[in-house]
Image (tube, rainbow, N blue to C red):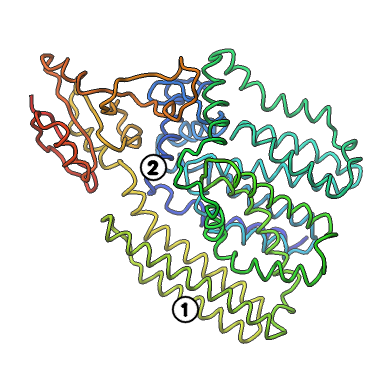
Amino acid sequence: MKNYPKILFLLLLVSFYLFFAFNSYLCITDTVESNYALTAKEMTLSSNWLSPQIYGKYWYDKPIFFYWQTAAAFKLFGFSEFAARFFPALMGILSILLMFWFSKKLSPANSMGLISGLILATCFEFWGIAKMVITDMTLFFFFNGALACFFLAYRGEAKQKNYYYLFYLFCGFATLTKGPIGFLLPGLIILLFLGWSKNWSELKNMRLLPGIILFLVTAIPWYYMMYLKHGRDFLMNFFGVHNYLRATVAEHPRDNVFYYYFTILLLGFFPWIAFLPQTIKNWWSTTKTWKNPDPETKFLILWIAIVFLFFQLIATKYITYTFPILFPLALLTAKFWVTNQKAATQGSASAASLCWSLVYITLFSLCLLGVVQFTSHHIDYPLGNLLLLLSVIILGYGCCFYLIYKGDTQRLFIMLLATTLLFNGLVTKNILLPLSQFKSAKELAFAIKDAYRPGDLLISYGEYPTSAVFYSGKKIFDLTNQDRTTNSGSPKLSWASKRVMPTITMADIENQRNSNVRVLVVLLKGSYPEFLHSYPIYHWRIIKKTSQDYLLAKIQ
């Protein structure tokens, strides 16, 4: 107990370093972050805390909770990058503390809580999403918190059965964050676990009636008020397009391949994925069977498998969908390091396994740098000093190989952790910062502010820069060759309903030729020749260039 303050301080220090460093300098990027940031900004400016809206139109992409968080941060810190990233980083820290608390409940050893928290914090995907303006870190906390509370209540005595109330509460907030999967997936995992354990009698202890009431009081009021205000439009878009259609029709067909989430796992759980085979092998040598694992192992297996398989089966694939499985994966990997520190290096086979794991980590890191370097040359965005990253890989992992040779598993973990922390910090500064500038229209937004005169018409050709709307506060029309239509009155579900930005056609612009309206067009450099070819009868003059965009003025 006397070491708790030191352990918590270390976890908080590492978490703050990983999740908050450089957040004020990471630009809001297109196309995902800018949607959340702009929606929360409009919510703040309009003081409409019920209905999310973007471009002045109601927006049913996600439930309300993350928008509330981001809008609250804007109220506290202003419309800034730090504010937009504040709650993802904070929820990341809370998730690390949740891991520490849950690990300590499962295993009283001090090192279990510390190691599991450090492993989770330094996972490549966890660290990255804690810095991103998206819903997934908030969902991660509530989703995994619900399952953690269930298992503690399941295995606990009479007083610990009250953890079931936290389970229902967390499911409610998960549903307010991401929708029906906030209770459907935890419910499915629990039912399969009870069936596998042949312990249906536990349902009597799950506080079902008061728990369901607690869940409904937490999650349902917002949905009910949205239905009262928006009726069928809300039901068709939120439940129809963003839930049913997402599950049955691939939004990005190129990603609907069987190996998609396996690839994400290799990157997302890096570098600790390299020790997963050793973890499985170690557990197998202990249990000697897959038929009767202990309840904790059963639950963790189902926790991972159901989330992974569920999203593997639905049509639309996203990088973050399987993100919650990092929690049980980190816990399993921590058990390997805690319970087998001595045994892991006693035999040559074990030492060889650790060596192969480090070979994978080293080669993967080098490949990552190579891909980044190659890509930067082809899409022309600046990078920081990659030689520093290369030096960290060679020196850090070189020391790890030496510690394996010496049989010092404890210092091996410390060295691997230190190398990962330094590597992630340098990736933020030398890769993420320039990449965020390249993927953001922040510079363009300031150019728009300088060139804009009252009454000007701003239009966008090609990729729509939502981040320019966020930073500039100006209305930008999306130039399209098609007639403007709306899907709100159509019963047919369509991905087109996600395009809610204001649109305009060249015919609309023609109708204003005699009104002396100045037209400003923004587009990517690569779209400039296509734009000139599409509208050859008009004459355009470039009035402003940015590092990745043109800002053009129509000559009347």
Q: Measuring from the top left, give residue 520's x and y in whole percent.
A: 18, 29
Q: Measuring from the top left, give residue 129's x and y in whole percent.
A: 51, 49
- Please tell me which residue lies in front, 290 or 459: 290
Label 2 SS: loop
Horizontal side of residue 361 vs 442, given as left or right? right
For the residues bearing labels 1 and 2, Cβ distance under 8 angstroms: no
Q: Measuring from the top left, give residue 425's x and y in whole percent.
A: 46, 61
> Which of marks 2 and 1 precedes in the sequence?
2
Label 1 SS: helix
From the image, which quarter does the N terminus lie in?
Answer: bottom right
Instruction: Give the CA distance from mark 1 to mark 2.
Output: 34 Å
**Circle 2 is placed at which residue position?**
28
Q: Name the kind of residue labelled 2 in the image.
A: Ile
Q: Of the numbered discs in the image, which one, if any, rests on residue 346?
A: none
**Circle 1 is placed at which residue position?**
395
Quadrant hosting residue 354: bottom right
Residue 409 appears in the rendering: yes
At horizontal 55% and vertical 26% (from top left) the residue drawn is: 240
Q: Measuring from the top left, give residue 282's x and y in whole percent.
A: 74, 71
At horizontal 83% and vertical 60% (from top left) the residue drawn is: 291
Quadrant hosting residue 222: top right
Residue 388 against residue 302 in the figure, above or below? below
At horizontal 36% and vertical 67% (from top left) the residue drawn is: 386
Q: Name the kind of residue labelled 1 in the image.
A: Leu
